Image (cartoon, rainbow, N blue to C red):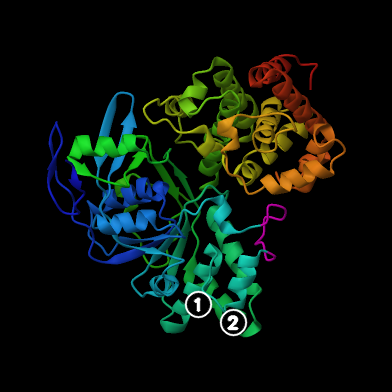
Amino acid sequence: MPRPLPRLRRATTPAAALTLPHPPAETGIVHLGLGNFHRAHQAIHTAAALRHTDGPWGILGVASHSATVARAMRDQEMAYAVVEISPDDTRVTVPAVHTGTLVATEQPDDLLDALAAPATAVITLTVTEHGYTFSPRTGGLDLDAPAVQADLRGHTPPRTTIGQIVRGLQRRMRTHARPVTVLSCDNLVGNGTQTRRLLHEFIQALPAAERDDLAPWLESAVTFPNSMVDRIVPATTDTYREAVATHLGVRDTVPVPAEPFSMWVMEDRFAAGRPRWETGGALFTDDVEPYELLKLRLLNGTHSLIAYLGALDGRETVPDATARPFIAEAARAVLHDDYLPTLTVPTDIDLGHYTGQLFDRWANTALGHRTRQVGSDGSVKLRQRVPEPALFHLRAGRMPHHLALTVAAYLCCVAPRPGFSPGPHATAMADPARETLATIAARSATGSGPSFVEAVLDSGLLGDGLGDHPDFAARVSELIDLIVRHGPATAAADAAGALRTPAHR
């Protein structure tokens, strides 16, 4: 019978002895968003860095509202396993870098104390794009959101990520005013720049007495480096719990599955020091944007198309989807024809190797990343991936057929036409814009068709500018009609055929 996972105990694998590392004694990093991605990415890189240097770089992990992972980690004395899986191998490691866990909704004052603690030098975030509470229409802080309004009034503990950070920094300024770094690790273009702007917008909405004290200190004492993170991390299932039991002989209720690949690129702008993450494989650069766009478009943008077409085709996982020839062809077309011409590839990236790796990663059958997971929150994700590349082509007189297919497949998944069922995997996708899209559909002339697509693009839900191109809306509508009437394979074939026909813009 597997025993509970200990923090400091030797275990053996069938191949060799595994020594569980000692965790740091001190906390230097507070991380907001205690999900699988953080535990398989920043935690792993930090653990690798700490093998090369000492330092007070333990991580206090903060869950926003769900206590499941936080409590399980406490029960397991902060230990958990990362299961790196490929078709050829399974490798299990225990990072052991967390010094504690909190749940923000249950321990709000402890969270503010942690953010304000003198020893806290870095505040990191993986709260997903949706967790920044910005308006899809303006890209700025959604000041009309009830949670943001409540956080601004300050009569109750802050509920939004932006509100929590501002109130924590406010407490920090009032107690000792030591500098600190806020490091976003989410899939936002210029994530550090965006985080800084959202915090400033929150501060500018505060009463003058609070604003006038806090804003100048933020400018002088807090840095916001941009970063790019990349690792495919699916949801935890019993398969991975069984893998830990087999490899370590212990029971772990919250292991994290992950692909072998991991990448982290950052600006080296840290106000109060940092771990030597470069010894753990991280890359530091003065210009993160080319890496961000490479990942957001080639990996994330293509991944979205695979997920939406796969879900509509009844495929539960991304490997199942990419095994379908029409989906693999569509993925290659959107990557090479629609996304790649819009990028400046960093000089240290071998493009052929990088794109080859992407298809190997998507085809990792051992990982089984679900289409419903990749396709969720598309209204937030696609507005960062589709509009600029689409406008790049449209302004040059070219129709980006596979970006149009991406939008069409997304709308079929989360805002299906009356009488059309997109299937269980699409129906299970979570999206904050479902209600908004339903309202737009109800107001359009027929509830679907060209008028619906035009209204969606005009709304700014998927970014600005696309509403100025009725030919793009018409193309999206054509592809929706093909998906509804004949299925996603027919729509993908039409996009591919149009691409090969110069006369069809």
Q: Say if residue 284 shows up in the picture.
A: no
**Which amino acid type is shown beneath numbered disc 1?**
Gln
Residue 247 sits in quarter = top left
Was residue 372 drawn as part of the magenta stretch in this picture? no
Quadrant holding the C terminus: top right
Q: Nearer the viewer, residue 155 or 382?
A: 155
Q: Nearer the viewer, residue 106 or 391?
A: 106
Residue 44 disc label: none
The reply, left or right, for residue 453 in relation to residue 162 is: right
* Residue bounds of the magenta highlight: 135-144
Q: Which of 424 and 369 is in front in this view?
A: 424
Q: Name the residue under label 1.
A: 170
Residue 70 sits in quarter = bottom left
Q: Position of residue 238 (x, y in %)?
A: 33, 37
Q: Position of residue 115 (x, y in %)?
A: 42, 70
Was residue 140 drawn as part of the magenta stretch in this picture? yes
Q: Check disc 2 and report its element: helix, strand or loop.
A: helix
**Which amino acid type is shown beneath numbered disc 2?**
Glu
Q: Position of residue 182 (x, y in %)?
A: 47, 63
Question: Which residue: 57% across, 77% down?
Answer: 154
